Image: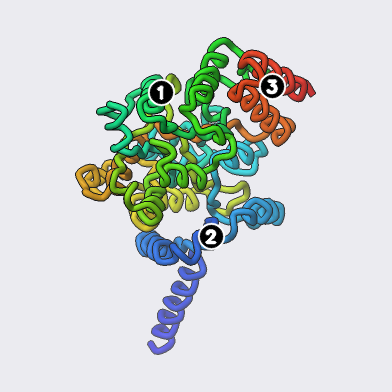
Amino acid sequence: MKLKKMLIVGAALFAGVNAQAADTELEFWTMNMQPKFNAYFEQATAKFNESNPGLKAKWVDMNWDQIQPKLIASIAAGNPPALVNFNVPWVHEFAAQGNILPIDQFLGANKAVYSTNAVKDVQVKGQMYAFPWYNSTQIIAYNKDIFAKAGIKNPPKSFDEFIAIGKQIKAKTGVAAFAPKMSDMIGFFFYAGLPVITDGKAVFNSPKHVAFVQKFADLYKAGVMPKDVFKMAFEQEIAAYNSGKIAMMTTAAQGLKRTETDAKAIYDKTEVAPFPLDAGKLNLGSWMMDFVIPKGTKDPAAAAKLGIFLTNDDQQLAFSKATESTMPSTKKANLDPYFQSGAKSADVVDRARAVAAKSMDNARTLTLTPGTLPDETVMTKKLQEEIQNAVEGRKSVKEALDTAVAAWNEKLKK
């Protein structure tokens, strides 16, 4: 009898050891999240592990420039992590290389959780290659006093109205209206619903492209845009708005914290509105992050379970609350009172967050697929130079775009 009991106890202990050994470790990598968001990821990891017996998520954070080389090395060594935090261009690059897995087979009904454009962002040849995670988008912050002096009662509802308001502001007040980010004309073309490359050839010198860029040239000539607009990046635009040199700025909701801190008088005069859509029906300034399953991951189905968990409505909402600056890529989370109740807040940052949340269905990462341009640095620089030549009046818009297209097509032929 004693021997029988010993055998039973021994078998139970052996089973327990085996059960522990059978836990599947799911290491997932993020970029630049420590130490600020340790609490969020520790809680998320614990929650997943508690609700998924047999699976053990393990969070690893690293600098953004370490992710790709470490992933490539781990794939080559046959020991990649379960999930890796990517941006949208990397998804397309690694999908083309065959180094990450399509995820549609694991999603099922969960695919409907994500916004339509978030899904499109990570589709390659009709298949999803990433779990959409956090996002961002731009809104308009505008000076109510300058609007009132210009006789403007409502923010613009379309891009053409945005331009018309800008002209009215300059004419009535003498203040420049806005400082569009002229360093990203490719993004502007997509925003306007205009193609950049078709059938392997640059096509951004069509009459529609010329007419679109001509709008900026006309605005520049009329002083609606500051004369140093081509030197202005994010910091310079905020500084110009905070000093009253421009009436509007395009910003993320959290960017207004800088105005509150550095220019409280301007902040108290600030109201917010969605950045109006153009023919592309897409927001400006979106940049989505996501999670991918690397090739060679030991248990892709388990990795997908973790990916679905980290990007579900509840977790995306919790992450947005932790960051106070990011927006979810899921439909339901953006409708949460955390965002929507801010529409009636006395705090303009809360109002800005509500405005951004309502526009997230139109958020799309407006960029060319990596590998599209054989000499990306040189080609984008050439486009930038010619756009500046056109806007500042050294060349006609048609001549400038023809020159850039010819230079691009020479590179694309090779």
Q: What amino acid is at disc 3? A: Ala
Which mark, residue 167? Answer: 1
Outermost residue toward the right in this view: 414
How many neighbours does mark 1 have within 10 angstroms: few (below 14), some (14-19), or many (20 or more)? many
Q: What amino acid is at disc 1? A: Lys
Query: What secondary structure is found at the residue carrying circle 1?
Result: helix
Measuring from the top left, give residue 57's x and y in whole percent.
Answer: 47, 61
Residue under pointer 3: 404
> In the figure, 409 relative to 302: above or below?
above
Q: For the residues marked 1 and 2, what is the alpha-carbon distance in whole angstroms?
A: 54 Å
Residue under pointer 2: 27
Query: What secondary structure is found at the residue carrying circle 3?
Result: helix
Image quarter (top left, top right, bottom left or bottom right) of the C terminus? top right
Q: In which quarter of the image is residue 334?
A: top left
How many neighbours does mark 2 have within 10 angstroms: few (below 14), some (14-19), or many (20 or more)? some
Outermost residue toward the bottom in this view: 2
Q: Which of marks 1 and 2 is nearer the N terminus?
A: 2
Q: Which of 128 and 86 is in front in this view?
A: 86
Q: For the residues marked 1 and 3, what is the alpha-carbon distance in whole angstroms?
A: 28 Å
Q: Give the color scheme: rainbow, by chain, secondary structure or one colour.
A: rainbow
> In the figure, 116 relative to 406: above or below?
below
